[in-house]
Image (cartoon, rainbow, N blue to C red):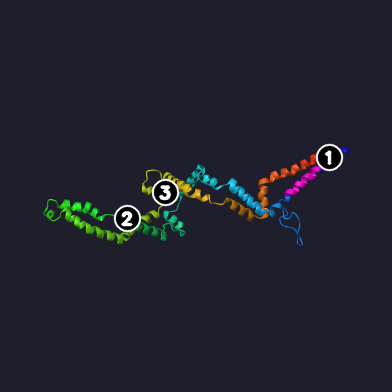
Amino acid sequence: MDIVIMLLPVLVGAVIGYFTNYIAIKMLFRPRKAIKIGSWTLPFTPGVIPRNQARVARACGEAVGERLVTGEDMSEALRSSTLREHILDLMTGMVTETEHTIGYYLDKAAGAAEAGDETGGSGVLEQINKAIADKFAASAGKLDYQTIIMDTAGVAILEKTQGTMAAMFINEERVQSLAGPIGEKMEEYIAEHGAEIALPVIREETARLAAMKPAEVLEDADITEEPSDFIRRTIGVIYDKLSEDVLAGAVKHIDVSSLVEKKINEMDVRELEDLVLSVMKNELQAVINLGALIGAVIGTVNIFI
């Protein structure tokens, strides 16, 4: 009995230490709302974290955005070889194994894809056709038709008439004088009707390509390397350029701090509590147990005082 009485302070100290820390940790989140008696708010309500959720959110945001995940960190992650290889594998597989055609993706990109429409028959392809035809006409209009006529038709005429009676009337100077006006007329005609002339041919070829899958287009082009290797290399070049010039610069402007702060502020107190406990449950329990241990030590000391 004397031993029980002697150990009672130790037991009481351990119980007090345990429940003191338990209540203190619970009061971090509880009560979740302020308790009012009339116009008077009960002290320590709501809990510490619910009462200071905005400040906690701001502090967490600053810690994550300025120390843990900075814009430079994200830029570096985009340029990592692991991510690059993963994206190349994913994109190469998507392009080489897809069952859809080029036309489907053209329409999809324009937000006009329809179920079962694999030909790209909407206005997307026609816009491309007209753009190509216009470019062709503009480029063709810059050609020196007089020189072309002289180098082809002019030379042929002079060769055919050489040694004949016609050679007396047809010489290089006379052919040159004819090539000038003919070249000008050709230039005017191409400028006015070049796109119209080229459009049917362009439509036929692009329609053929639009009905093919990406891998089939590469096979049709008769490239020397494997289509999958060509696709992977091409995607790699595009990805490297984007990650270096576009994405790396863009992510530096992502305000990670504000994103984290906004997310925490939008959380319900119960969600926030669950989040903290999912990360620190064992550590918080250790604090409670330590309170019991300290209480027991203090109770032991009291025995000898």
Q: Magenta stretch?
A: 13-25
Q: On the image, numbered disc 2 is attached to which residue?
A: 139
Is residue 130 in sight in this rendering? yes
Q: Quadrant of residue 4?
A: top right
Numbered label attached to residue 302: 1
Q: Nearer the viewer, mark 2 or mark 3?
A: 2
Q: Amino acid at mark 2?
A: Ser
Q: Residues within 10 Å of mark 1 (few under 14, many from 20)?
A: few
Q: Position of residue 209 (x, y in %)?
A: 38, 53
Q: Which element type, helix, strand or loop, lies under badge 3? A: helix
Q: Which numbered disc flags the more N-terminal residue, 2 or 3? A: 2
Q: Could you give the CA–CA distance between mark 2 and mark 3, rounded to whole angstroms?
A: 30 Å
Q: Which numbered disc flags the more N-terminal residue, 3 or 1? A: 3
Q: Which element type, helix, strand or loop, lies under badge 2? A: helix
Q: On the image, numbered disc 3 is attached to which residue?
A: 215
300 vs 79, left or right, is: right
Which residue is more in the foreground, 239 or 107?
A: 239
> Residues at badges 2 and 3 in contact (C-beta under 8 Å)?
no
Q: Position of residue 17 (x, y in %)?
A: 78, 44
Q: Amino acid at mark 1?
A: Asn
